[in-house]
Structures are given as structure tokens and as C-alpha cells.
Image (cartoon, grey):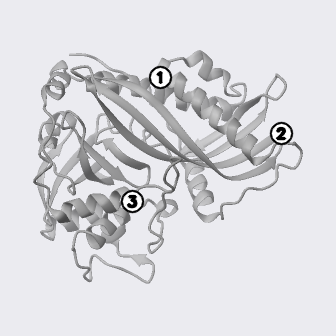
Amino acid sequence: MRGILVVKKTTILRYLLLFLLIAAFFFTKPAIENALSTNYEKNQWEEIIRTFFERRNNCLLAADTQTLESMYLTSEQNGLWAFENEKIRLEYLQNWAVKQGIAILRIQSCPTIRSIKQVGRGYAFYIAVVTEYQYRYSEDPDAVNTFKIGTYHSLDLIPGSEEDSWIISREWYTDPLSDSLDITAVPEEVTEFIAAHASTDSSGITEQRKAAVQYADTYWTAGSDGQNTYEYNSAYTNYNSLGGDCANFLSQVLYESGGFKKNSYWNYRGAKGSRAWINAQNFKNYLLYGGRASLIASGDYLQVYTHAYALLPGDIIAYAKKGKITHVSLVTGWDSKGYPLVNCHNTDRYKVPWDLGWSEDGITFYLLRVNY
């Protein structure tokens, strides 16, 4: 057995602030306000923010907590919390990579400043960020895999001790890796099983499943990767600040591209979705009990990870904590070892390994075959 341990640290206050961030981001009209007391132009702020993300990503790759800590005002509580969150993410990514048998090659972020406002000692930013991760398996070094995550940041910068330097005094954001960052003991045979698996043949995927993936790839985030500017589908209400948008997003996939018809129980009208449309628990139950999906397997990671290879693009994974479904995602492909990848909202994911960010004890996975 190989023991892997990451310290978990969540508080009610933290989740409250995250909720306020989401509400502020999605209900505030994006605008760049003048930075009144400096001579910085918009492009200069963009370079400062881009440099922060680049330095932080390099710290994550190198496991450099000392440089990482120097970027934060750790003498104050908000800055300390922000640093500790990044340190936990660093440790989690390292340990998940060990479990997976991979090396993370590159982390590259593309931040888009949505607003700037002078506050107190410095400046407050709302930022949409698309971050691309590249990795490869030690057993297959020539195949480079890529996934992306979308995050929405409330970030405060204040002047540093050196001239024209800045330091992070506060940062809150929707983190796709924050759902469960404890990795418990994982048998070595898990890594060996993943490494031994071959790539998956996608030639037999039906047109409906391809259409479902295309929709999920089009509307997966509201950020930009420098090449594409993404948006959620504006024809639907964004429920991120109202409890979560994951089920709403997958309902859109099934209706818009999967050929599923609305009914009195599963419905969206008048800018409002029914409970089965927008609530993850009700959505999962509706699919199973309504005959629109069947259960491939359920259980903790060790009970289902071998069954996950049976998933096809267009299938669904539901994630439960303490017996309640809290999240759903759509399978959108496989990596070079046939490991299923997912797209989702809430914490925006694009072609992300299906268990990344869901690693602690007490998580139950439901693998659903969707009946297109």
C-alpha cells in the first residue's frame, strides 16, 4: 500500500466568500474601471496579472512553496488563507500525479481582467482564467495529454516592499480542485492498472454522442484561452451563484444535442428550470428512474475505477458526498491511456480526468450509461 496524505482545510467563512465571489462575478457587468491613483494602463495591469499566474504555475510545477509564499501577504489572515489554499493544491496535484503515474509537464494560464477597482491600500480585480495543463504517462512518454480548467478570481493586490512590486493580500476563487483534496491510501496496483491500459478506439461513437460532446466543448466556460473566447449559452439562466450550474449544463446537453424531449418533470421554460433540470440529485434520479440512463457501477474510487473504462463520450458521472449527489459531469473523451475525461460547470472543466479533485474518503461515484 502506498499512503498519500494531503491536509484538508475548509471553513464556513471560506465557502460564504466563494458564494459572494460567484454572485459578484456573474451579476456584475464586466468593465475595466480606471486605476485612479497610478499611471498603469490596462495593458500594464494585464502583464502584472499574467506574470503572477505564470510565477504561481511555475511554483506548482517545481513544488516551490518558498517562492509561492513570497507572493502573498501572509502576515494577514486573508493573504495567509490564499497562500495555504495554493499550497494545498500544490500538494494535491503532486499526490494525484503519483496515483495516476503521470508527470505534469506544463501549466499555462490565460487571465482576462473583467474589472479593476481601487480599494484601500491597492486594487481589486475580477478575473476569468483558463488554465491549460499538460501531462504524460511514464509508460507512454511520447503522448502528451491536455486538459483545461476555468476559474473566476477575486484578487486584491497591494504595493510590495520594492518599487513597482505587488503582493497578493486576498484571493478567493471557484477552484475545480477544491471539492475534495484528501487522497487516502491507494494500492500500487491502481497505478499499475492505469499504466497498463491501452488507448481507446473512438470510431464507433454515435452522432448523438458526438453532438453532445460538441455542445459541452462549446459552452464549457466563460473565460478565454487567448485563442477562443468562451461563453455559457445565453439562452439559459446561469445557476452558478444560485446553487450550481452543473445539472443545468448537462440538461442543456441532453436537450440541445442529445434529442431528449422535455416533459412536466424535466423541463426548462421562462428562464427557469425544474428541479430535475437544475438539481444534481434530482437530475441523476430522473435519468435512472425515468429510463433515460442505466447504472454501470457505483461506489468509492477503488470500487469503480476499473468500470470507468466502459464509459463513452456522452455518458454521465455523478459525485455524491454523504449520500447526496453534489455534482454531475459529462464524459467527453479519453486520454492516451483510455482514462475517461469530463466537461462540466460549477467549477469549469474541459477534458479533465474524471476523478481529479474528487479523491477523499466518503465520495461515491455513479457511472451512468445515457440512453441516446
**Quadrant in the rendering for residue 283:** bottom left
Bin the neighbour count of mark 2 within 10 Å (Cα to Cα): few under 14, some 14-19, many 20 and up. few
Which label's residue is closer to the chain start, 1 or 3? 1
Total count of labels: 3
Residue depth check, mark 1 versus mark 2: number of the one nearer the observer:
1
Element type where label 2 sits in the image:
loop
Q: CA distance from mark 1 to mark 3?
A: 29 Å
**Residue found 72% across the figure and 25% down from its top:** 75
**Quadrant in the rendering for residue 161:** top right
Q: Say whether residue 195 is left or right of residue 165.
A: left
Q: Which residue is mark 2?
A: 121
Q: Which residue is mark 1?
A: 61
Q: Which residue is mark 3?
A: 218
Q: Say whether residue 56 is left or right of residue 353.
A: right
Q: Which of the labelled discs sits on residue 238, or is there none?
A: none
Residue depth check, mark 3 versus mark 2: number of the one nearer the observer:
3
Which amino acid does the dot numbered 3 rest on? Answer: Thr
Which amino acid does the dot numbered 1 rest on? Answer: Leu
**Residue found 36% across the figure and 37% down from its top:** 146
